[in-house]
Amino acid sequence: MQIISGITDFQLHTKTAAAIGKFDGVHLGHRKLIEMITGRTLNDPDIKSVVFTFNPSPESLFAGHALPELTTVSEKREIFRRLGIDILIEFPMNTETAAISAEDFIREYLVEKMNAAYIVAGSDLTFGDKGRGNADMLRAYSGEFGYECNITDKIIYDGQPISSTRIRDAVEAGDMELVTALLGSPYRITGVVSHGRKLGHTIGMPTANVIIAPDKLTGPYGVYYSRVYLAEGDFPAISNVGVKPTVMEDELLCCESFIYDFDKDIYGSPIEVELLKFVRPEMKFASVEELKAQMEADIAGGREYDTISGQV
């Protein structure tokens, strides 16, 4: 997958089928758009599939600081790669680009620079200066600029539309089952296994520690039933999300996972942790023995959960 990031001066020389949006979470609605453009490229091998998104998000720009998102930049890139996208454009969002008129955005970027022959977007799309561009405008200019346009409505789940806002609310509430349903896959935390306090080693329950990116939205601090993906395969686990002090006394947000029946050295390895179910909030313990007893109870519950969920 080709990535064009942080620049406005680019040129695609082949015809493209483009999906436009913020793509936070890459949820079922976003995946519908992606299926539309990848389906078009299958029928016409001369067309390349393009996802056009913004970095940082317009919300972060207007807030004046980075806002946590469902998917980090690196996570989005990996999802798009796995979904078969040919080209990803991460359009720089700043005061200058935000002031581009909606008409100029269509003409200069979608038509001239991206060579778009087919454009898809959600019905709630906004773009251009003061968000004046929308799905209706995109459709209205299709005849003048010679592209085909397909605007889709939001997917409805359990009587309500799927949106990134709805998913963020569910993550923050710890409703990981709803999050999974809306995303089409479990919520993931990705990173590299790093050294922690090694408290787990002292009680015979070593954990894989991952520092969570500061721009990653997390749910309630506490314990989750989870599934861990490593180069060696995927494994059931139990994970704790919370702030842990490092040896330098700084506080870092981490995800620590105890992988059942696994004893390989994976420090420095890439890891993906799926958070399947929120179990309980973080607790303070009077002693290491109390902590160990609670962890043993959590692990027993996690094994039972994995057995039951695996039978569904």
Image: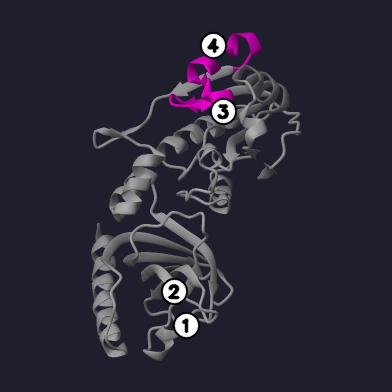
Span of residues in magenta: 119-147
The three-letter amino acid code for the residue at tag 3 is: Arg
Q: Is residue 302 left or right of 87 when viewed as pictured?
A: left
The location of residue 213, given as percent across then percent down, is 52, 60
Q: Nearer the viewer, mark 2 or mark 4?
A: 2
The three-letter amino acid code for the residue at tag 2 is: Lys
Provide the residue designation for mark 3: 40
Does the residue at mark 4 contact the one at mark 3 (Cβ under 8 Å)? no
Secondary-structure class at tag 3: helix
Q: Is residue 311 left or right of 39 when viewed as pictured?
A: left
Q: How is the image coloured?
A: one colour
The location of residue 15, given as percent across then percent down, is 69, 26
Q: Earlier in the sequence, mark 3 or mark 1?
A: 3
Mark 2 → mark 3, Cα distance in angstroms: 47 Å
The location of residue 204, given as percent across then percent down, is 38, 88
The three-letter amino acid code for the residue at tag 4 is: Ala
